[in-house]
Image (spheres, helix red, strand yellow):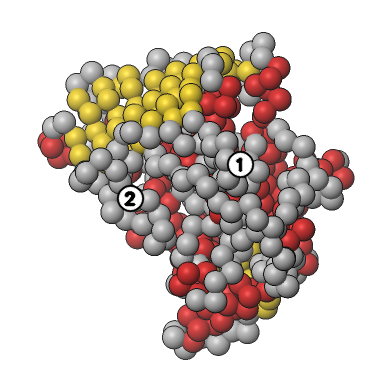
Amino acid sequence: MQTSRRDFLKVSAVGAGALAFPNIIPARVLGADAPSKKINVLQIGCGRIGRSMDMPGILKQDGARMIAVCDLDSVRVKDGKQFAEETYAKKDIKIDVATYGDYREALQRKDIDAVAISLPDHWHAQPVIEAALAGKHIYVQKPLTMTLVEGRAVSDIIRKKKLGFQIGSQQRSNPGFRMACEAVRNGRIGKLHTVKIGLPTDPSGGSTKEMPVPSNLNYDMWLGPTPLAPYCEDRVHSQNENPKKRYGDRPGWLRIDSYCLGMITGWGAHHVDIAHWGMGTEMTGPIEIEGKAEFPTEGLWNVHGKYHVEAKYASCVTTIIDDTFPTGVRFEGSDGWIFVTRGAEKVTASDPTTKKGKTRALDSSNPDIFKQPRGKKDIRLHVSPKDDHHLDWINSLLTGKRAATNPEQAHRSNSACIVNWIAMKLGRKLTWDPKKEQFLNDDAANAMLSRPERAPYGAMTLLKKNA
């Protein structure tokens, strides 16, 4: 950092435009050597995704220090502290990591610069907004929010505050996905007309038998803005004494639509985001949607099973999402096709794998597509340093350069998933206005763009209080 804080902020203000480029850099990171040049991070959520992805991803960054962890489960927060301190100890770094059961208390600390939010989907919007109001930079797991109304509010406030942002759409930092999207946007397969997206499904089932609430869990706050419901382990997360099981199994909340809409947003937020990246529709959405799905009628887990949904965009490109397709994104154009997926890569041990036999992580109708030299006028998409999504975020906070994702892109990819889910629930054709973010002449569909909130929790309740 060879610039003054004043000069840095001038440059950031000029380059920010309408996007949320960070321009609130703590004065101490512009000083001498470490630790004054580190971004102090609060980790909110020490469960499966936190332990397997976000905590390791941030703890290894030289430009950041995780100085506090928070979780509603006291066992998890204790484990999170130990995990962070032991990770740093291996690098001869001694940090006494603070612990919190309520992130709102930690947000009051002035020495915390940024937060990483690794919580269930129904607990994304409120802490993101509270972190933004506190002036903290934000990393949040996908999908951005549970509802479209929340997503609009989140995007607006982060951009208004001009805070650094990254969402856990790590495929944006994967060179294979970037190569595929660049090739499509530069016309390597001719005129794009169809994008086929394959997603897994979640099983039905889950025990509805009420259980005593564990003494280590703040269950009322875990429910947050959702309706009161009896506690059972299949509703929340594993309380197994074995850490490998406690943090390895996919939790039940992923399969209950009070807390998650299912794979249509769970993995859909990843692959629809890539579809938008390749289509060049990152700031808009579909105009017509029609879908169908099977929803369980017995057991606790009630998110969708088998499904098929088609969405038409103003560019005349149609996306088709179907559980029978190989997991990944297939771009089809007038002169060929490109398919991209994670292959066998997993974020956690319990993640689903690619279906329909063996598929290459990056494939095409013509292998020469990726050998063609790029022209001077070719579109070049964002390259994350070292193909590392967390490094990309920390680097953006230290330099003022944009990260791989911005809040509006995150909102738009998630909003497309949400309107697809609404079409699946209603089972009929819908017309969508991506500018107004409303369905045309359809009160029933528009009513599904938001949800009631149980006091005193909820993002929209919070915003009303701060209006």
Give amino acid for label 1: Asp
- In the picture of the structure, the residue carrying the numbered disc 1 is 257
As measured in the structure, the alpha-carbon distance from the residue carrying label 2 to the one carrying label 1 is 23 Å
Residue neighbourhood size for the residue with mark 1, other residues' Cα within 10 Å, grouped as few (<14), some (14–19), many (≥20) = some
Q: Is residue 239 visible?
A: yes
Q: Name the side, left or right, on which 99 lies relative to 58.
A: right
Quadrant of image for the C terminus: top right
Q: Residue at x 49, y 31 (%)?
A: 294
Residue farthest to the top, as pictured? 441
Residue 127 position in % (x across, y down): 70, 54
Residue 98 position in % (x across, y down): 67, 78
Of pointers 2 and 1, the one earlier in the residue sequence: 1
Under circle 2, the secondary element is loop
On the image, which quarter does residue 190 sit in? top left
Residue 132 position in % (x across, y down): 70, 52
Which of 35/64 is in front? Answer: 64
Q: Is residue 96 above or below residue 307?
A: below
- In the picture of the structure, the residue carrying the numbered disc 2 is 353
Q: Residue at x 78, y 67 (%)?
A: 105
On the image, which quarter does residue 334 sit in? top left
Count of marks, rendered view: 2
Q: Name the side, left or right, on which 263 lies relative to 200.
A: right
Q: Name the side, left or right, on which 307 lies relative to 161.
A: left
Which of 239/402 is in front? Answer: 239
Under circle 1, the secondary element is loop
Which of 98/110 is in front? Answer: 98
